[in-house]
Image: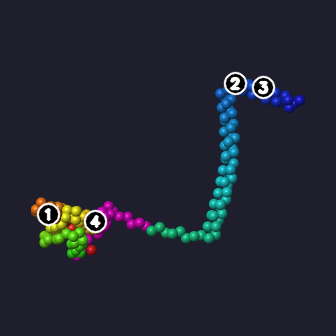
Amino acid sequence: MASSLDFKRLQWVARRVQYRLGWPGMALVALLVATVYLVAVWLAPLQTEIAQLRQELAMQEAALRLHPQPHPQPHPQPVSSPEQALAQELAEFDARFPGIKQLPEELGVLFRLAEGHGLQVVKGEYSLSEKKQGSVRRFEASVPVQGSYQSVKALVLDILDALPNVALAELGFERGESLEAEVKTRLRLVFFIRKRAA
């Protein structure tokens, strides 16, 4: 009898709340109850996992206390001024250029490449020019070659590929008779070389 009265009382309270809140309010209450239930269901496994992780961490700390491992000492990085950094960058830049002693070898590479393309190298003119500022010298070589246009083009591409410190300053063609397959070409190449000895 008492339980039926309690149930009727609960029904009366539910109708009263429904009347006061309306259907939107009841839907909100149901949504809140469902959210609380879902959070409780999701949080329980997470709390178990957190407890396991804390236990593992405590065990690792205890093992480290029993067997401490030496910490490597960090090497202090030398602090350089902007001037020192610039000087280092310039030194690295200079090191990319060959020295004057390598110049005959580079000219040899040039002549071997021309020979490999079947081009005839005629007498050339060479001059060493140096600007007052800067850390590189310019060695200019005027190299007349004779052969087909395709061979000259291939030679120029191979020179620039094999000798990265060389620039093509001028390329001049001269064709004699219109029936001739070969052209006379003048290559003016600039070899950039290191001013200071390595």
Q: Which mark is residue 180?
A: 1
- 14 inside magenta stretch: no
Q: Which residue is mark 2?
A: 20
- Using the rendered image of the protein, determine whether residue 94 is visible from the camera's viewpoint: no
Q: Nearer the viewer, mark 4 or mark 1?
A: 1
Instruction: Give residue 8's position: percent from left, percent from top.
Output: 82, 27
* Element marked by disc 3: helix
Question: Which one is nearer the viewer's eye here, 121 or 25?
Answer: 121
Q: Residue at x 61, y 67 (%)?
A: 64
Distance (Cα) linking label 2 and label 3: 12 Å
Direction from residue 71 to residue 51 in the image, left or right: right
Name the residue carrying label 3: 12
Local crowd at mark 4 within 10 Å, few (<14), some, or many (≥20)? few
Residue 101 part of the magenta segment: yes
Q: Which mark is first along the chain, 1 or 3?
A: 3
Q: Secondary structure at mark 4?
A: helix
Task: Give the residue at mark 4.
Answer: 161
Which residue occupies the foreground of this view, 7 or 83?
7
From the image, state whether disc 4 or disc 3 is nearer to you. 4
Question: Label 1 amino acid?
Answer: Glu
Inter-mark Cα distance, 4 to 3: 95 Å
Please state which of the two labelled residues, at mark 4 or mark 2, is closer to the viewer: 4
How are the colours assigned in the image? rainbow
First-in-chain label (4 vs 2) = 2
When asked about the image quadrant of residue 171, the answer is bottom left
- Spatial CA span between label 3 and label 1: 116 Å
| Label 1: element kind | loop
What residue range appears in magenta?
Answer: 76-103
